[in-house]
């Protein structure tokens, strides 16, 4: 219940709707409870005394109460709808904001599909719990207390039947809730698994079709979909036992009431109108008990979703942002005995004892074999991950002394996996910096060689790229990402193998354009030696350690790893090396 209390604080900004819904629901319930009393008077006074005027007056009063109950019920529905949708919006917004604060290490703790489910399906479960639970949560106890009280006022002896029925109903509800509580958690995990398969399939749909693996993917989806169906069947099979169990108990109670009530009428201790009114209250009590039991079931399901949402909020942030006005003044970078591992419990470091000093305006090339931690090294600079040991300085200050926003504004990174967003080319270019002029856009496009293919599109910068940039090739996508990063005007720019899909001639033009930016520190990760051979310094990484540092000529003359990489990319490897 603590989890639910924590989440319901997101309803506080819109508490006026909850208050109005509560008031209207109470008023509606009171008018509904008055109607059986009026009906009993019509039978016992109006019908017995053949008083038509009394019957008409009381009948008009019943219609008036019914109309007021209808109006207040509609007002309740309107305000409860506003309350629940506002609550859901606030909860999703807070959850999304928390995810934006996650570092890469935090994101590694969750499946992407699971986070999507927690933002959508789990929040919807919470909304449905309020939408479907608010009315019975208010009406149930109120109708139970008032109905039981009025039933006792009519005939206390007959009301003793509830003393037998209530414990039976409580025991049934306890057994159902006890069994169903863990099932709801499994149900949401089954939804996660379905989302994982769907996401993977849609992201890799071209690969699936290229390898003709549609049948295999269908089989995988069928497996998780069947698992979801089976889990849902087991869960709701148990949940629906609630209704017939309660009905059996309460209808048994009604039969007992009719039997004992008839005996009381026979001995003239009760009138027919009183028994009719008593039965009306019995039905309302029965409905209230069913509503209360359904509230418990909805709370049980919402608890499972609440725990999953709370897990997002309770995830300890791997990166603590230092609120600071300190700005990156220049692009110097200093790695001082830096070591890093992705998990604090890991036995080995991904990077070990890195000592590296990069001056402002230098061009640094980084090469190495697959898995040598090249990308990991550069991701430490904008604090996508935090160093485990040692000190990393940018602009002469430890990166942890900067506000994350200031630091990442000063460090532009073109990631290995290029990402474009739905929208036009202009919107994607302005994504990193919306306050640039047309001249700056043209400059960035020329430097990144975007202008070479931009003229092929009739709409130019206003060309719609489609979802994820499906309307451009891999090389064009890389150039657009480079132009987008240049428009940030960073002090440091990192290219993480981001020209791999660009031909060598275009790459040379981009390199020439970047060389004119004298104050910009450039770090280039590449597989091709030709991409880094013109760099001021080349860093060779091997198994997360710096193997060698030097320029092209020095390394080619002295370093066996560099020689192997260089000659293997030339005319035939060993035979021409």
Image (spheres, rainbow, N blue to C red):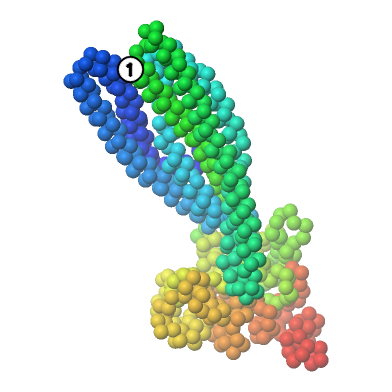
Q: Quadrant of the N terminus?
A: top right
Regarding residue 311, the answer to whether it shows in the image is no
Residue 528 vertical placement versus 127 (above, below): below
**Rendering quarter of residue 423:** bottom left
* In this picture, residue 2 sits left or right of residue 87: right
What is the total number of numbered labels drawn onto the structure image? 1
Residue extending furthest top?
A: 267
Q: Quadrant of the C terminus?
A: bottom right
Query: In the rendering, at what x and y percent does residue 504 appear?
Result: 61, 87
Few, some or many residues within 10 Å of mark 1 (<14, 14–19, 20+)? many
Residue extending furthest left?
A: 53
Residue 435 vertical placement versus 269 (above, below): below
Q: Nearer the viewer, residue 342 or 167?
A: 167
* In this picture, residue 230 sits left or right of residue 39: right
Query: In the rendering, at what x and y percent does residue 447 appear?
Result: 51, 83
Residue 262 vertical placement versus 554 (above, below): above
Q: Nearer the viewer, residue 502 or 174?
A: 174
**Rendering quarter of residue 222:** bottom right
Look at mark 1 in the image and give the residue it sits on.
273
Residue drawn at x 71%, y 85% is 552
Residue drawn at x 59%, y 89% is 505
Residue drawn at x 65%, y 83% is 531
Regarding residue 407, the answer to whether it shows in the image is yes
């Amino acid at each position: 219940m603590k989890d639910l209390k924590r989440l319901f604080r997101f309803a506080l900004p819109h508490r006026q709707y909850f208050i109005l819904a509560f008031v209207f629901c109470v008023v509606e319930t009171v008018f509904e409870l008055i109607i059986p009393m009026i009906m009993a008077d019509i039978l016992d006074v109006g019908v017995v005394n053949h008083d038509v005027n009394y019957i008409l007056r009381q009948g008009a009063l019943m219609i008036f109460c019914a109309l007021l109950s209808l109006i207040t019920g509609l007002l309740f529905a309107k305000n409860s709808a506003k309350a629940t949708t506002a609550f859901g919006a606030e909860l999703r917004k807070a959850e999304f904001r928390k995810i934006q604060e996650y570092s890469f290490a935090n994101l590694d703790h969750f499946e992407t599909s699971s986070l999507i489910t927690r933002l959508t399906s789990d929040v919807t479960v919470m909304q449905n719990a309020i939408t479907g639970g608010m009315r019975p949560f208010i009406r149930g106890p109120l109708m139970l207390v008032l109905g039981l009280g009025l039933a006792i006022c009519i005939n206390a002896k007959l009301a003793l039947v509830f003393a037998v029925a209530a414990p039976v109903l409580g025991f049934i509800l306890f057994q159902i809730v006890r069994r169903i509580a863990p099932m709801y958690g499994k149900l949401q995990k089954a939804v996660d698994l379905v989302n994982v398969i769907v996401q993977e399939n849609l992201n890799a749909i071209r690969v699936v079709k290229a390898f003709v693996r549609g049948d295999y993917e269908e089989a995988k989806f069928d497996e998780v979909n069947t698992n979801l169906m089976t889990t849902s069947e087991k869960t709701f099979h148990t949940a629906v036992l609630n209704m017939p169990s309660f009905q059996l108990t309460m209808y048994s109670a009604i039969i007992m009431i009719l039997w004992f009530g008839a005996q009381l009428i026979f001995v003239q201790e009760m009138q027919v109108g009183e028994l009719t009114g008593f039965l009306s209250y019995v039905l309302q009590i029965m409905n209230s008990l069913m509503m209360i039991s359904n509230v418990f079931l909805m709370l049980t399901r919402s608890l499972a979703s609440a725990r999953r949402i709370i897990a997002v909020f309770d995830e300890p942030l791997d990166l603590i942002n230092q609120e600071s006005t300190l700005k990156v003044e220049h692009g110097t970078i200093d790695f001082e005995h830096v070591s890093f591992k992705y998990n604090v419990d890991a036995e080995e470091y991904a990077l070990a004892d890195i000592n590296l000093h990069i001056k402002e305006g230098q061009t640094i090339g980084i090469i190495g074999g697959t898995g040598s931690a090249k990308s990991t090294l550069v991701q430490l600079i904008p604090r996508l991950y935090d160093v485990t040991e040692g000190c990393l300085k940018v602009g002469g200050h430890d990166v942890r002394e900067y506000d994350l926003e200031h630091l990442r504004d000063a460090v532009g990174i073109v990631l290995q996996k290029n990402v474009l967003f739905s929208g036009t080319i202009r919107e994607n270019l302005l994504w990193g910096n919306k306050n640039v002029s047309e001249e700056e856009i043209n400059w960035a496009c020329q430097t990144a060689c975007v202008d070479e293919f931009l003229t092929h599109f009739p709409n130019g910068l206003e060309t719609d790229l489609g979802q994820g940039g499906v309307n451009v090739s891999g090389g064009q996508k890389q150039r657009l990402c480079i132009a987008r990063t240049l428009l940030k005007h960073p002090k440091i720019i990192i290219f993480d193998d981001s020209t791999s899909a660009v031909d060598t001639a275009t790459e040379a033009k981009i390199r020439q354009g970047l060389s004119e930016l004298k104050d910009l520190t450039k770090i280039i990760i590449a597989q091709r030696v030709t991409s880094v051979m013109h760099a001021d310094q080349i860093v060779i990484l091997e198994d997360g350690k710096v193997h060698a540092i030097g320029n092209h000529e020095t390394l080619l003359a002295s370093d066996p790893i560099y020689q192997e990489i260089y000659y293997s990319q030339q005319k035939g490897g060993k035979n021409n090396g």
